[in-house]
């Protein structure tokens, strides 16, 4: 079975709930195992807190792949290179930030090397590459994670990197669609608003994502909690059907859209609890909700709010 066929599980006899969770430690706790067995989430994302050694990591991913039964389970990680790399030496080499990648061959080789390393450890999804453009004066949250400021160059390098991952059996997640580079704020900490006109974004921010979409490469896309005032000035992209429409109809991206972490402070003023925000996101903007902090009470509330 292809690693890119998770969507079909939404219509299984025992429906998979479209949410990806972090877990608390280097192995599933009894409480986590019980909750996830009862509610059947789509997958899991691992962080440094979950990684202790090669043997432990392989045992953890093997457990995650099997304990929910005979289906493909998403196991994600943020492995971009540079300052965003969860598997560090000696588990994997230190890879350069995307700002230092200048050629398509180099970009493919780095993506492929990362993909092969992740496959060895049991991962099947990498939240990379970053296709956001670099803008002077913007928040440093993107910074050297970007391939640069030229939209066509970012599109070419990003597509090569994504192809490298895919050829190693890893699903790429292009981020942060439709573009986070202009943001003056880090959505981990604050509400972020992009005030560029739609025409400005069409000729710059959207371009790298459109190039990947045009290629036909099978991948996912991550949407961040940014308000794009020219599209919808009432709420972040992850809650906006208007932004989703732009992604589908103008950028042309047809694959799975996953939210950025629902725990980010940039989203907090738009909900009072997780029981309302997760269904709203799924109804309006995303196909999969991402929750990273492993708070089991929050995870339970989200799972119980999803009636599929």
Image (cartoon, grey):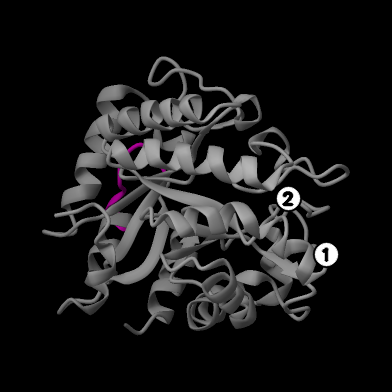
Provide the major secondary structure of the magenta segment: loop
* Numbered tag placed on residue 295 in the rendering: none
| Figure check: 219 above or below 26 | below
* Numbered tag placed on residue 181 in the rendering: 2
Q: Is residue 26 magenta?
A: yes
Stretch in magenta: 25-31
Residue picked out by circle 1 = 196
Residue 129 seen in the figure: no
Q: Earlier in the sequence, mark 2 or mark 1?
A: 2
40 or 236: nearer the eye?
236
Between the residue at mark 2 and the residue at mark 1, the CA separation in whole angstroms equals 11 Å
Q: Residue at x 69, y 68 (%)?
A: 268
User: Mark 2 packing: few (<14 Cα in 10 Å), some, or many (20+)?
Assistant: many
Q: Position of residue 77 (x, y in %)?
A: 43, 42
Q: Is residue 50 left or right of residue 150?
A: left
1 or 268: nearer the eye?
1
Residue 190 seen in the figure: yes
Quarter of the image for the N terminus: give it. bottom left
């Amino acid at each position: 079975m292809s690693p890119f066929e998770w969507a079909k599980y939404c219509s299984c006899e025992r429906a998979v709930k479209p949410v990806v969770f972090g877990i608390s430690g280097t192995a599933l706790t009894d409480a986590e195992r019980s909750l996830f067995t009862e509610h059947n989430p789509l997958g899991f994302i691992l962080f440094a807190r979950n990684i202790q050694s090669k043997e432990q990591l392989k045992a953890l991913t093997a457990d995650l792949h099997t304990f929910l039964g005979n289906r493909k389970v998403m196991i994600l990680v943020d492995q971009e290179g540079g300052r965003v790399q969860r598997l560090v030496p000696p588990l994997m080499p230190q890879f350069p930030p995307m700002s230092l990648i200048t050629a398509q061959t180099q970009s493919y080789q780095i993506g492929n090397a990362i993909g092969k390393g992740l496959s060895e450890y049991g991962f099947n999804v990498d939240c990379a590459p970053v296709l956001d453009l670099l803008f002077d004066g913007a928040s440093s949250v993107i910074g050297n994670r970007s391939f640069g400021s030229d939209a066509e160059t970012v599109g070419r390098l990003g597509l090569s990197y994504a192809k490298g991952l895919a050829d190693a059996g890893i699903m790429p997640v292009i981020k942060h669609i439709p573009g986070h580079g202009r943001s003056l704020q880090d959505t981990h900490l604050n509400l972020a608003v992009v005030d560029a006109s739609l025409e400005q974004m069409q000729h710059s921010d959207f371009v790298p994502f459109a190039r990947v979409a045009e290629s036909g490469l099978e991948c996912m896309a991550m949407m961040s909690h940014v308000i794009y005032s020219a599209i919808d000035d009432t709420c972040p992209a992850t809650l906006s059907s208007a932004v989703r429409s732009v992604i589908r109809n103008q950028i042309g991206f047809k694959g799975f859209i996953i939210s950025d972490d629902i725990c980010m402070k940039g989203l907090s003023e738009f909900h009072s609890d997780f029981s309302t925000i997760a269904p709203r996101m799924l109804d309006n903007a995303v196909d999969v909700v991402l929750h990273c902090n492993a708070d089991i009470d929050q995870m339970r509330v989200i799972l119980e709010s999803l009636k599929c």
